[in-house]
Image: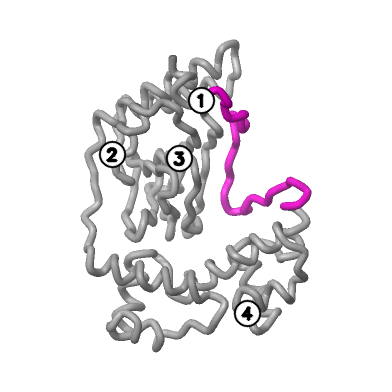
Amino acid sequence: MGDNLINILWLAKSEYPSGSSLTPHSHDYYQIYYVISGEGDFIVGSDQVTLHRGMYVFSKPNDVHGIATTRDVNGEPLRMLEVKYVVFDAALQENLNHIPLVCQGSDSIEQMLALVFEEAIETLPWYLEIATHTFVAALYYMIRYQKIDLVVNSSKSEIVEMIKNYIHENYKNEVTLDKLSQLVGRSKNWICKNFKQTTGMTINLYLNKVRIDKAAELLVNSNLGISDISRAVGYNNIYHFINSFKKIVGTSPGNFRKHELSGNALVSSKVRAIATIPAQKTRSDV
């Protein structure tokens, strides 16, 4: 029955050296990051929380998540089991949608996830069926045993969201601390401090990431030249744009466009990920 409930899209064991980060993002499928060693400051929505071994991020479609920074613990870097999946069953989906973004795991959940990865790596007969059924069981354990919810400072979060929304709407233009301070009615020092505490990023870094994300979309989905894209996303100096793009993405805009259009998406050299189950076709009968 498990294969009628969900579809596992992708599995990976990832390793993040100390000081690594993952740009906040969202997507239209579910994803789990289960920490098996090390420690990381995770960005979940507009909050930041530290996760260590035995904790996991339970990301639902359109939930924003990322990593501000990572640390070694007892000489071990942040390592995680990652699962991307879609859910077809309405009742299961309803239960999953009540799970908070950050949860405490258990020995049972970790053992089941380990079995899912073991099956996927060995690819013996019926491995996908066994992996899928085992993962469904792990999901039900997560529904039963989830323990940790985030305590959100709503006032601070609302102000940070106002700043983020303003940046998304005005990234093509000059964004200054004076304008943001006037917008939210707080001092420049206050917004800088609380934005960094909440998101794990400075306002300037967040602005640059938004601009670079928009630039990446234009590189793949338009025929605009790099200088035109630079201006379109708010950079007056093309060299500043190229340097910012390299720093955030890890390669030049031209190289990014070439690899993306050829289907060979780039993976950061800092993060080792081993895909064990390739993407499958989404079912059309549901």
Identified at 48% across, 72% down, the residue is 169
Instruction: Report the residue marked by disc 4.
Output: 235
Return the x and y of residue 75 as percentages of the image width and height: 43, 48
Residue 188 occupies which quadrant of the picture?
Answer: bottom left
In this view, the residue farthest toward the front is: 285
Dot placed on the residue nearer the N-terminal end, 2 or 3: 3
Q: Is residue 268 located in the magenta-colored stretch of the structure?
A: yes
Instruction: Report the residue marked by disc 1.
Output: 286
Labels 4 and 1 touching (C-beta < 8 A): no
Q: Secondary structure at mark 2?
A: loop
Instruction: Report the residue marked by disc 3.
Output: 31
Dot placed on the residue nearer the N-terminal end, 3 or 1: 3
Q: Which mark is residue 98?
A: 2
Q: Is residue 110 located in the magenta-colored stretch of the structure?
A: no
Question: Which three-letter amino acid code belongs to the residue tagged 1?
Answer: Val
Q: Residues within 10 Å of mark 4 (few under 14, many from 20)?
A: many
